[in-house]
Image (cartoon, helix red, strand yellow):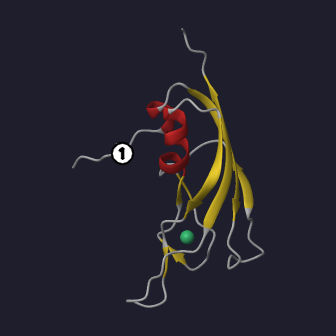
Amino acid sequence: MTSLFPDVSFQEAFPEVKSFRIEYEHTETRIEPLGVRNGVMTELNGNKELRCKWHRCKQGGFAIQQEILTPLVSKGETTGEGLIFCHGHEFLDKRNKPSCPNRLRYRVFIEYNDRKE
Ligand SMILES: [Zn+2]
């Protein structure tokens, strides 16, 4: 099996990145209000995603590396912000699986290792 996204860590894929910081907020009114809506991320877990907070979401998550970090790092950007969508779905019954409504608003700051010119 070959994969478009080989299973290497973020640090292995982008050794030029010294550190990053992602400030995020879940933005969808249907999310349980008692849940933690905001947070900060400074490292990636194994699947490079942030779990979706919507309790009825199945197989959801936010592709932090693929949708936020990779595009910015490949352009050498140090900051960025935007909105990404959860790739999961709500499970209502076997045939009714609407897309998850959860979104993630983010701001990201990336620090690079010194580069030799
Ligand atoms: Zn979701």
Identify the image quadrant of residue 42: top right
Label 1 amino acid? Phe
Q: Where is residue 81 in the image (x, y as percent from the top left)?
A: 66, 47
Relative height, residue 78 to residue 82 (above, below):
above
Q: Please report the residue visible at 43 percent of the width from the left and 88 percent of the height from the top.
A: 96
Q: Out of 104 and 56, give the one closest to the viewer.
A: 104
Relative height, residue 68 to residue 26 (above, below):
above
Tell me which image quadrant ligand 1 sits in: bottom right
Q: Which residue lies furthest to the top in this view?
A: 117
Q: Please report the residue visible at 51 percent of the width from the left and 50 percent of the height from the top.
A: 67
Q: Where is residue 3 in the image (x, y as percent from the top left)?
A: 29, 47
Q: Position of residue 53 (x, y in %)?
A: 63, 69
Identify the image quadrant of residue 33: bottom right
Q: Please report the residue visible at 74 percent of the width from the left and 59 percent of the height from the top.
A: 38
Image check: 66 left or right of 24? Answer: left
Q: Name the residue under label 1.
A: 5
Image check: 90 left or right of 41? Answer: left
Identify the image quadrant of residue 18: top right
Q: How many labels does the image show?
A: 1
Q: Position of residue 57 (x, y in %)?
A: 54, 75
Which secondary structure lies at badge 1? loop
Mark 1: few/some/many CA within 10 Å (<14, 14-19, 20+): few
